[in-house]
Image (spheres, rainbow, N blue to C red):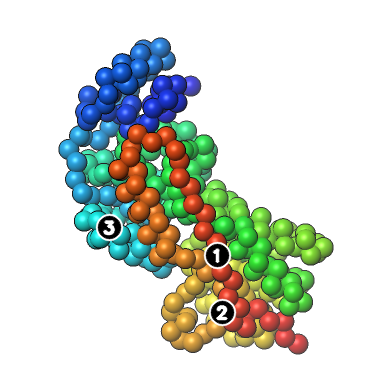
Amino acid sequence: MAVTIKDIAEKAQVSLATVSRVLNNSGFVKEEKRELVLKTIKELNYVPNSVARSLSTSQSNTIGVVIPDVNNPFFGEVIKGIATVADEEDFNIILCDTDENIDKEFKALEMLKKQRVRGIIITPTSDKNEFNSEYLEALESLGIPIVLIDRDVKYSNFDGVFLDSLNGAFEATDALIKEGHKKIAIIAGPQTSKPGRDRLRGYRKAMIMNKLDIDEKYIFYGDFKLESGYKITKEILKMEDRPTAIFVCNNMMNLGCIKALFEQNINIPGDIALIGFDEIEMLNVLNFKISVVSRPTTEMGRVAMNMLIDRLKDEESTHTKRITLSPKLTLKGSEKLLD
């Protein structure tokens, strides 16, 4: 396996930023640390490649924000939180939408590198990045602070702001069970993302703890987008042994689910109960009461931006900051089991 700058940083016990400065002969590095890094590079026979070239030393007051779906209101609220702190601290933002596409994400990172951004806040795509060493090395080799938001990257040491998705899904499923539902379908997210896996785990945990059998025919897999929620719900409605409740694992799939239910004149909760993950403001405006697991979305953005600023002030720190926020289950009546 090729040696990465992370290997160098770990062996020399310095930050990735320090290794990047030494490799690019840029920025201030104490002489003893510079010599240590150069010695480690020689010992490990490190050969830099085109991906591993760091950003230019020219600094700006610009940060990059990389999200997977600009149409998702969740990310709009996150960006609002980021922008609030960025404005207060006189930072500009370059926003990139990857559309859950790994190739677009690589292009976005390359563009941000050329723009010499100071740091990046990113929600990685759900395209097996957690298991992709090339992807991890590409992020690390940028040589600038990176803060993850909502989704993790396995084996990384990046700062991050996350949500306790497992417990949120557990509470939602448990609430349906407490209402008397036994046949509960779940429209899960992609299992290549941690939130997708954790929400399915929360569902399974609630079923097991309530001593209910988990019927795999009620487990469906979407992609966190509206169309998948729509198509899956139409499949659910065709089932002979139809579930009495559906738990949908994000807001966009929930919108698709509600669209399908409306088209079939299915009453919520009269014909089928429903709980979604993430608030949908449009439904609140229309006074359409859907029970939901809500996240402190704007707060997540604020925390991520403050975390990035702290890292910019102390890039030499090897301490990784990771914060997990708690969701809130709000029951509005759509979870009911009606005769």
First in residue order: circle 3 vs circle 2: 3
Q: Which mark is residue 201?
A: none
Asked whether 88 or 155 is in front, the reply is: 88
**Corner quadrant of residue 231:** bottom right
Image position of 24 (left or right of 215) = left
Tell me what residue is drawn at x 20 percent, y 34 percent: 57
Asked whether 226 or 116 is in front, the reply is: 116
To which residue does mark 2 refer?
A: 290
Residue 217 percent across, percent down from the top left: 72, 62
Does residue 78 appear anywhere in the picture? yes
**Corner quadrant of residue 328:** bottom right
Which amino acid is tagged 1?
Pro
First in residue order: circle 2 vs circle 1: 2
Q: Secondary structure at mark 2?
A: loop
To which residue does mark 3 refer?
A: 86
Q: Residues within 10 Å of mark 3 (few under 14, many from 20)?
A: many
Which amino acid is tagged 2?
Ile
Q: Is residue 224 above or below residue 122?
A: below
Image position of 316 (left or right of 248) = left
Q: Is residue 178 above or below residue 153?
A: below
To which residue does mark 1 refer?
A: 327
Q: Residues within 10 Å of mark 1 (few under 14, many from 20)?
A: many
